[in-house]
């Protein structure tokens, strides 16, 4: 699978640095954000290294659909029953800090620390 040896999320996929996993299958991994904005704050990533949403093509349509489709099941499994927020920061002006495609999925009772 396509991986970048310098990428922190590829290292999480490879088990080289720890993460609190919430879901895993052949293509996707979800783990809890290390600096949560909300009571439940999970990142959903493809296991393959794709740097940013700006680089995806039609060949990634199914993968992107699976990432989004996972969000409601994940939130349900984590006990979030009153709505959630999904965010993908893309590129410098999008506020992206980690260049491995990821979708933030945030839920739980408000107020939240951010967002
Ligand atoms: P973004 O601005 O969308 O690129 O956000 C990157 C997110 O990754 C931030 O919310 C960070 O708190 C989170 N993050 C960075 N390193 C880790 C890590 N090792 N484990 C879990 N979350 C991380
Ligand atoms: Zn990566």
Image: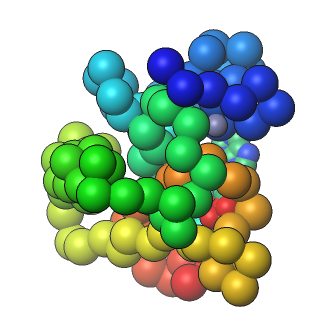
Q: Position of residue 15 (x, y in %)?
A: 63, 14
Q: How many marks?
A: 0
Q: Horizontal and vertical percent for residue 79? A: 25, 50
| Residue beneath the point at 20% across and 48% down | 62
Please give the name of the residue rendered at 19% of the width and 63% of the height, measured from the top-left corner: 81
Please indicate, yes or no, whether residue 47 appears anywhere in the rendered image.
yes
Question: Which residue is depicted at the point 29% across and 48% down?
Answer: 59
- In the rendering, at what x and y percent does residue 20 appear? 55, 30
Please state, as top left, top right, bottom left or bottom right, where the C terminus lies in the image: bottom right
Q: In this view, does 81 lie to the left or right of 59?
A: left
- View extreme (top): residue: 15
Occupied quadrant, residue 36: bottom right
Q: Is residue 31 above or below residue 40?
A: above
Q: Indicate the position of residue 104 as horizontal and vertical percent values.
A: 48, 61
Which sits in the foreground, 87 or 62? Answer: 62
Q: Can residue 35 be seen in this view?
A: no
In the image, farthest residue toward the front: 58
Q: Residue at x 43, y 47 (%)?
A: 44
| Front position in the image: 77 or 18 | 18
Q: Which colour scheme is used?
A: rainbow
Using the image as rendered, state which of residue 20 and residue 94 is in the foreground: 94
Q: Is residue 95 left or right of residue 64?
A: right
Q: In this view, does 96 lie to the left or right of 87?
A: right
């Amino acid at each position: 699978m396509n991986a970048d040896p310098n990428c922190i999320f590829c290292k999480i996929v490879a088990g080289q640095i720890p993460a609190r996993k919430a879901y895993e299958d052949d293509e996707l991994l979800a783990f809890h954000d290390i600096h949560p904005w909300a009571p439940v704050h999970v990142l959903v990533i493809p296991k393959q290294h794709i740097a940013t949403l700006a680089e995806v093509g039609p060949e990634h349509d199914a993968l992107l659909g699976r990432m989004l489709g996972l969000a409601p099941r994940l939130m349900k499994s984590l006990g979030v029953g009153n709505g959630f927020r999904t965010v993908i920061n893309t590129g410098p002006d999008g506020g992206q800090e980690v260049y491995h495609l990821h979708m933030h999925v945030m839920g739980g009772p408000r107020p939240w620390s951010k967002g």
